[in-house]
Image: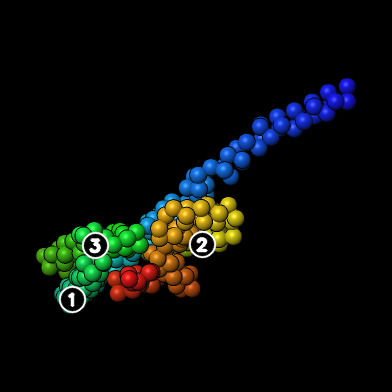
Amino acid sequence: MRRFASGSKAACVLGLVVLFGSAGLRAAEGPPAEVLKRYALRPAGPLYVLEGEAEAKKQWSEFRQLSRKLDQALLQRASSMTAQGQQAMIQGLGAQIGQLKGELNAVNQQINGLPRRRNRLANNMVQEQFAELTAYRHELNLALTQQNAQLAQVKKQRPDPKLSDRIDAEIKTLRDQRLMAARELELVVRTTKEKYADLATNDEVQKALASLALTIKPRPQLGPSHEFHEIARFAERLEKDGSGSHARPAHAAARKPKHPPK
């Protein structure tokens, strides 16, 4: 009877392991990439980055777009009052267009200067830089198209003081929207940074990365990406400013590769 009870107890313990512990065992013993996926990490060149980075990029882009729209609305209010104001808006839009063209030219130079081998990008790190620069070039082209359309419209319109009330309401709405976008950006950046800090001390994640390094070159590393570092610095400036006002991101001139090509 004692031997039977002992055997039953062992079977019961084994059953509990099967019922409650098997999922954890499979996760620990599964492919390293699957382990990283469970922590919402995805490959981006040589890095594994959190999915929260995509949301940070989205919020960053939205804030910049709202900033440009607000700048245009402020210029439009000035131009609606007097002929002098209209001329000032034309000059202001011209300056903004010139700046966008300069940034676009700098981005194109950086893209063209990325190292290639046999007409292909040299490695995963360069591919990551290419993806970031290409996305930013697309955003600049859209902004340039919008600014040119705005300039053409301003040149055709006549000063009309009656428009100022409508424009004032639009300015207030844009300021509120931009403030909300700034707060959302700060939140997603803060949350993502905290998750990265936790993952940096997570043994399961570090073991998975070390296991992948045995078969993948260059050695896979935990993010964040170079672009997220840039977004995080911008969000910090916004938070210190406290109002989401005219803080401008570091654009093409500051977009240097995280790992210099060899």
The image shows residue 25, relative to residue 107, as above or below, that is above
26 with respect to 124 (left or right)? right
Inter-mark Cα distance, 2 to 1: 41 Å
Q: Which quadrant holds residue 256? A: bottom left
- Residue at 44% in and 53% down: 215
Residue 117, can we see it?
A: yes
- Residue to which mark 1 is pinned: 91
Decide which of tag 2 and tag 1 comes sooner along the chain: 1
Q: Residues within 10 Å of mark 1 (few under 14, many from 20)?
A: some
Q: Position of residue 105 (x, y in %)?
A: 20, 70
Foreground residue, 155 or 180?
A: 180
From the viewer's perspective, is the residue at label 2 or at label 1 nearer? 2
Q: Position of residue 66 (x, y in %)?
A: 33, 62
Type of residue at label 3? Arg
The image shows residue 83, relative to residue 172, as above or below, that is below
77 with respect to 213 (left or right)? left
Q: Quadrant of the C terminus?
A: bottom left
From the viewer's perspective, is the residue at label 1 or at label 3 nearer? 3
Q: Secondary structure at mark 1?
A: helix
- Residue at 85% in and 25% down: 3
- Residue to which mark 3 is pinned: 117
Tell me, yes or no, whether the two marked residues, 2 and 1, touch with CB atoms within 8 Å.
no
Foreground residue, 136 or 83?
A: 136
Give the residue furthest to the right. 2
Tell me, yes or no, whether the two marked residues, 2 and 3, touch with CB atoms within 8 Å.
no
- Residue at 62% in and 36% down: 22
Q: Secondary structure at mark 3?
A: strand
- Residue to which mark 2 is pinned: 193
Q: How is the image coloured?
A: rainbow
